[in-house]
């Protein structure tokens, strides 16, 4: 099963108001494991970015001046995601923007949903945790995913974080890295277990005293009498 965890950054909130995509970030999962393959592209939107949006992602108009327009990168992007299940947090937002970009190119590409299926992790989180906060930051805290390096939103960074959250939400195991970090370690394929150091001091074993063992047996006998012989601990030979 091939899944693409996807995120975008935009010039504003509404494509109906002419806002455009300025960054796309994707990471690939195959059979619920990170492959190390990713797609990342900054895009020149042919319009100004709202100040409020810049405060969220930190991408400036000047930074995007020499970046390619969407029409120059669409084929590579579609080739990367085609046939996969897209995993997106608040999918209607990102799908709406991608469909807007495809629409501006005419009828050649149709809608995103004709090329991929879509799983919305926000909708999934709301079902799993009704009445709770289900933003990506809230899910990171709930599932103990480290996002301390996320000072600003970024499409590729958010896609990587969402991949970890999604795997934990749905009961899978993320890659547990030993030594290496990031895509370099993910490309190794095999999940690694972090092992404790062998030079740790030996744990102290404290055994019950004769007095404590006598009190324990007396307590079990009392429970057995009160339950008419149904004390499970006694039946297991601990009397």
Image (cartoon, grey):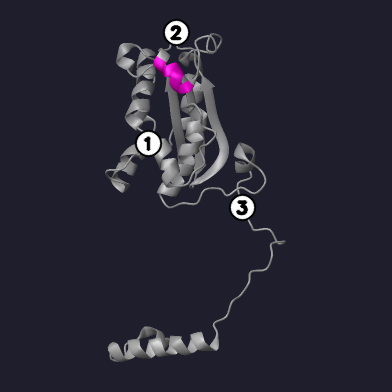
Task: Tell me where residue 26 appears, x and y as whole percent.
Answer: 49, 31
Give the CA distance from mark 2 to mark 3: 45 Å
> Could you tell me residue 87's position as x and y percent?
41, 37
Q: Which residue is mark 3?
A: 192
Q: Which residues are magenta?
A: 52-57
| Relative depth, front residue between 116 and 152 | 152
Q: For this rendering, which residue is in front, 200 or 81?
A: 200
Circles 2 and 1: CB atoms closer than 8 Å:
no
Q: Dot 3: what SS?
A: loop
Tell whether position 54 is magenta. Answer: yes
Pointer 2: what residue?
A: 46
Q: Is residue 132 visible?
A: yes
> Is residue 176 placed above or below 181 in the rendered structure?
below
Residue density around tag 3, few if under 14, some if 14–19, many if 20 or more, within 10 Å: some
Q: Is 77 left, or right, of 197 in this rendering?
A: left
User: Tag on residue 135?
Assistant: 1
């Amino acid at each position: 099963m091939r899944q693409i965890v996807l995120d975008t950054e935009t010039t504003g909130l509404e494509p109906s108001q002419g806002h455009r995509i300025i960054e796309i970030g994707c990471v690939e999962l195959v059979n619920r494991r990170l492959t190390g393959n990713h797609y990342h592209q900054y895009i020149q939107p042919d319009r100004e970015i709202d100040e409020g949006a810049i405060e969220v992602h930190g991408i400036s108009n000047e930074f995007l001046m020499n970046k390619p327009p969407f029409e120059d990168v669409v084929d590579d992007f579609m080739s990367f995601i085609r046939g996969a299940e897209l995993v997106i947090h608040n999918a209607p937002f990102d799908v709406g923007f991608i469909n807007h970009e495809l629409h501006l190119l005419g009828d050649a590409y149709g809608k995103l949903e004709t090329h991929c299926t879509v799983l919305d992790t926000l909708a999934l989180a709301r079902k799993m945790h009704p009445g709770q906060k289900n933003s990506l930051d809230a899910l990171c805290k709930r599932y103990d995913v480290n996002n301390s390096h996320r000072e600003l939103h970024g499409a590729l960074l958010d896609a990587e974080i969402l991949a970890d959250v999604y795997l934990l939400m749905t009961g899978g195991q993320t890659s547990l890295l030993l030594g290496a970090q990031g895509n370099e370690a993910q490309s190794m394929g095999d999940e690694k277990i972090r092992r404790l150091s062998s030079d740790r001091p030996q744990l102290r074993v404290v055994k019950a005293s004769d007095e404590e063992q006598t009190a324990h047996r007396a307590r079990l006998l009392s429970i057995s009498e009160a339950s008419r012989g149904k004390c499970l601990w006694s039946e297991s030979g601990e009397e």
